[in-house]
Image (cartoon, rainbow, N blue to C red):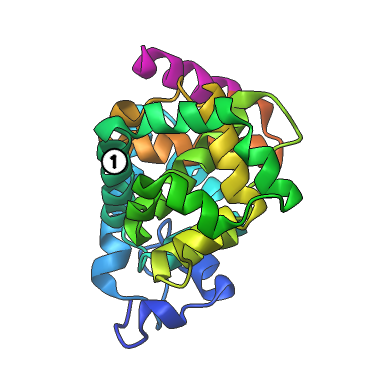
Amino acid sequence: MIRNYTATANITYRQYVSALAAMQNPNAEVAFWFSGTFSKLKEAFEGFAATFNIAVKDVIEAFKAKPVYRLLKAVGFNLGKLLSSVVKAGEFLRSKMLAVFRTIGQSGVIQKLREGAVTVDQFLDEYPMLKKITGPIMAGLLLYVWLSMSFIGSAGYDLDITYIVNAFTGSFSVKDLFASDSGLMMLTLFGVGSLTGLSFPWLGGSVSNLLLAILYTSYKNTGKPAFVKKFANQIMKKRY
């Protein structure tokens, strides 16, 4: 039984894990979860598990990762909002922004930003289109980078999930973004074309595709080679 009286913004990690466990036990009492939210997540997990022929418990296990919890909490545990941010980011990139990122990557300005030779204000004045990167678009871009990290094959890349969370909650401006290591890393990756494989059209195509990328990333980070291989094969089939 799930009682509806605690706002999603107040759900702790411990409560979240309990709610995930309750998905496998319909008789469990979870007195803090919105029944609608719980039901939609459960339906998404069950549909995904059926599509990819895996156990629901293995989907749930991946979602117990703290970065995934923090990400979901930032959007009120609404997978649709996550998907929407990726779609908006994709539309933004396709509006000539990829060419802008490539120009930035070839200009040497990223290194100047790192060294402090160029200020963020000067950088944004030179590339004013970047000022259009607002909350949902910024969150979608950073989410895309985070979900693409596992395909890059370099342990040197590490994006702080806090930046994605802050972008969703509106407490992270474009100036904050490009003053951060994660923002500069994003510029570098887009600039050199490292992120062209995991395409936005694929990632933003459905909740199922987004779940697939999240599961792959979660299991890649927690060291479950059997699942990593399985999900990687599924992703390759969908991407191309």
Left or right: 208 as drawn, with respect to 116: left
Looking at the rendered structure, the secondary structure element under dot 1 is helix
Q: Residue 50: image x %, image y %? A: 32, 33
Q: Report if residue 231 lies within the magenta region.
A: yes
Quadrant in which the N terminus is drawn: bottom left
- Residue placed at 29% from the left, 41% from the top? 92
Image side of residue 118 versus residue 21, left or right: right
| Residue 46: quarter of image | top left
Q: Is residue 109 visible?
A: yes
Q: Nearer the viewer, residue 22 or 75?
A: 75
Q: Position of residue 87 (x, y in %)?
A: 27, 42
Extreme residue toward the bottom, this view: 5
Residue pictured at 62% horizontal, 25% vertical: 152
96 vs 72: above or below = above
The rendered magenta stretch, by its main secondary structure, is classed as helix
Q: At 33% across and 57% down in the image, what residue appears?
A: 136
Residue 172 in picture, x, y percent from top left: 48, 67
Q: Position of residue 228 (x, y in %)?
A: 59, 27
**Magenta residue check for 206:** no
Question: Residue under circle 1?
Answer: 92
Horizontally, residue 178 falls left or right of residue 114, namely: left
The magenta stretch is 229-240
Instruction: Using the rendered image of the protein, determine whether residue 190 is visible from the camera's viewpoint.
Output: no
Q: Look at the picture and state if 26 lies above or below 7.
A: above
Amino acid type, residue under disc 1 in the picture: Phe
